[in-house]
Amino acid sequence: MAKTTCAKALQNWEQEHPGEQPSEAEDIRLMFQNPPLDKLDPPVLNTLAKVKRLSLSSNAIEKMVNLPGLRQIEILSLSRNNIKKIAGLEEIGQTLKELWLSYNYIERLDGLQPCVKLHTLYIGNNRIKVWDEVDKLKDLPEIANVLFVGNPIYENQKDDPKLLVLKRINTLKNVDGTVVDDSLMEKVKALGDGGPTTTIK
């Protein structure tokens, strides 16, 4: 079946926003393309020099790619696609604040290191099976808000998985939609030295 290209998706956007130019827009939403987008086209997307929020969720995108033209991007939404690996963030890591990747097929949290401004990561309902992957978020100096619900690491845990995340990254402000307060941190301390199951088989 034919797929929608990024160029066609932007044409659709222009039809929905008469008088506006994609190259000047700060918020561009290309969700639910019919037929869906299946790949990102850098020559097309790199023209979006002023975009701060780019939404490409609910398509069939398989790979993340470098998009150096998105010099002002702050929010990138790629939820509900077919992505298996976090990649292509080297060129936008200096500005990206929120990354939405829920409902994909991601197993590892490699590739986030360039995102020095990232404070929000939504990665629920993926395939993260190993708790050591969560530790990789410690390298992100601004990370504060995460969502892991629906990943295999949350299965078969006797303790609340949110507490297990906080035990590993105690600087977070919000986990799975729950604000981190003193009472929650007291529960984390009460966990003692026991840890979560490290691998889900």
Image (cartoon, helix red, strand yellow):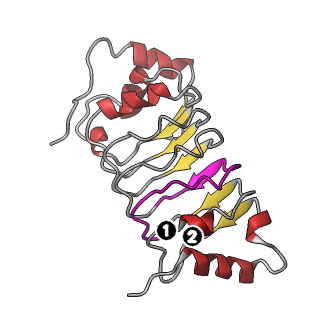
Q: Quadrant of the C terminus?
A: top left
Residue with the most extreme right position? 19
> What residue is disc 2 on?
31
Q: How many marks?
A: 2
Q: Which residues are magenta?
A: 58-79
Q: Quadrant of the N terminus?
A: bottom left
Residue at 71%, 57% (x, y): give it: 51
> What residue is disc 1 on?
58
Q: Give yes or no for residue 49 being in the magenta stretch.
A: no
Give SS at disc 2: loop
Place residue 45 in its image quadrant.
bottom right
Residue nearer the viewer, 87 or 54:
87
Residue at 47%, 77% (x, y): give it: 36
Residue at 47%, 15% (x, y): give it: 186
Q: Position of residue 18 (x, y in %)?
A: 81, 81
Main SS, magenta region, reads loop
Along the polypeptide, which appears first: circle 2 or circle 1?
A: 2
Q: Position of residue 199 (x, y in %)?
A: 20, 35
Residue nearer the viewer, 4 or 143:
4
Kindly identify which numbered label has been placed on residue 170: none
Which three-letter amino acid code belongs to the residue tagged 2?
Met
Q: CA distance from mark 2 to mark 1?
A: 6 Å
Asked if disc 2 and disc 1 are in contact, CB closer than 8 Å, the reply is yes
Q: In the image, is 122 to the left or to the right of 117?
A: left
Which three-letter amino acid code belongs to the residue tagged 1?
Ser
Q: Is residue 175 above or below residue 12?
A: above
Give SS at disc 1: loop
Q: Position of residue 47 (x, y in %)?
A: 68, 64
Q: Is residue 199 above or below residue 51?
A: above
Local crowd size for mark 1, using a 10 Å CA cut-off: few (<14), some (14–19), many (≥20): some
Q: Is residue 117 above or below residue 20?
A: above
